[in-house]
Image (tube, grey):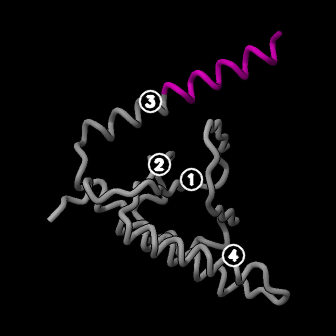
Amino acid sequence: MQSPIEEISDAYLFLDKPGNIIQWDLNAPFAGYAILIDAKLLSKAVKDISFANYDRQEALFLTGEEKETLYDLFKKAFIEFQKRNCSKEVFISYASLILSYSQIHYERQFESRSKIYTKLVADFYKQLDAHLHETVALSFRG
C-alpha cells in the first residue's frame, strides 16, 4: 500500500481568504476552476473549517481520488452557475462541500508533513509580504 504522499497526483487546490491579492505567474498552461465568493455568503460554512482563518494557505496536493471528488463538485458548481435561474443556495452548498472535503484533505496533508515545513512556508509568506509592502511603498515615493 502506498503512503498518501506517494499517491499524490499532479492536481492541487489553492484556497485563500477574501481580501487577499492573488497573482499567478505560470510558465506552463494549466486548466481548472476558480470560485470567488463574498465572505458574507460563506460565513456559515467557514466557521467550522479550521484553515479558514489562516492568513495564507499552502497548496493542497490531491490524491487521484481527492482530485476526482473535488473536480466533480467544481464541475457541478459551474453547471449550476451557468443556469439561467442559478440557485444561490445550491451554488453555496457546492462551495461548502468543496470546503468540507478540503478540510479532510488538508488534515491528511498536514499529518504527512512536519511542523518545520509549515513554519518554513509561513516564514516565506511573511518575507514575501514584507517585500511586496516595501516595493509598493517605494513605487509611491518615486
C-alpha distance separating marks 1 and 2: 6 Å
Label 1 neighbourhood size at 10 Å, few (<14), some (14-19), many (20+)?
some
Q: Residue at (54%, 77%) from the top-left corner?
A: 72
- Label 2–label 4 contact, CB within 8 A: no
Compare marks 1 and 4 and give the one earlier in the sequence. 1
| Magenta region, residue range | 127-142
Amino acid type at mark 4: Phe
Compare marks 3 and 4 and give the one earlier in the sequence. 4
The reply to whether the magenta stretch includes residue 136 is: yes
The numbered disc on residue 124 is 3
Q: Nearer the viewer, mark 1 or mark 4?
A: 4
The numbered disc on residue 57 is 2
Residue 137 in which image quadrant:
top right
The reply to whether the magenta stretch includes residue 97 is: no
- Does residue 14 lie above or below 101 as drawn? above
Amino acid type at mark 3: Phe
Q: Quadrant of the C terminus?
A: top right
Residue 27 in picture, x, y percent from top left: 62, 36
Residue 105 in picture, x, y percent from top left: 36, 65
Compare marks 3 and 1 and give the one earlier in the sequence. 1
Label 3 neighbourhood size at 10 Å, few (<14), some (14-19), many (20+)?
few
Compare marks 1 and 2 and give the one earlier in the sequence. 1
The numbered disc on residue 16 is 1
Residue 79 in picture, x, y percent from top left: 70, 81
- Label 1–label 2 contact, CB within 8 A: yes
C-alpha distance separating marks 2 and 3: 12 Å
Q: Which residue is mark 4?
A: 78
Given residues 43 and 26, the one toward you in this image is 26
Q: Secondary structure at mark 1?
A: loop
**In the current view of this chain or complex, which residue is farthest to the top?**
142
Q: Secondary structure at mark 4?
A: helix
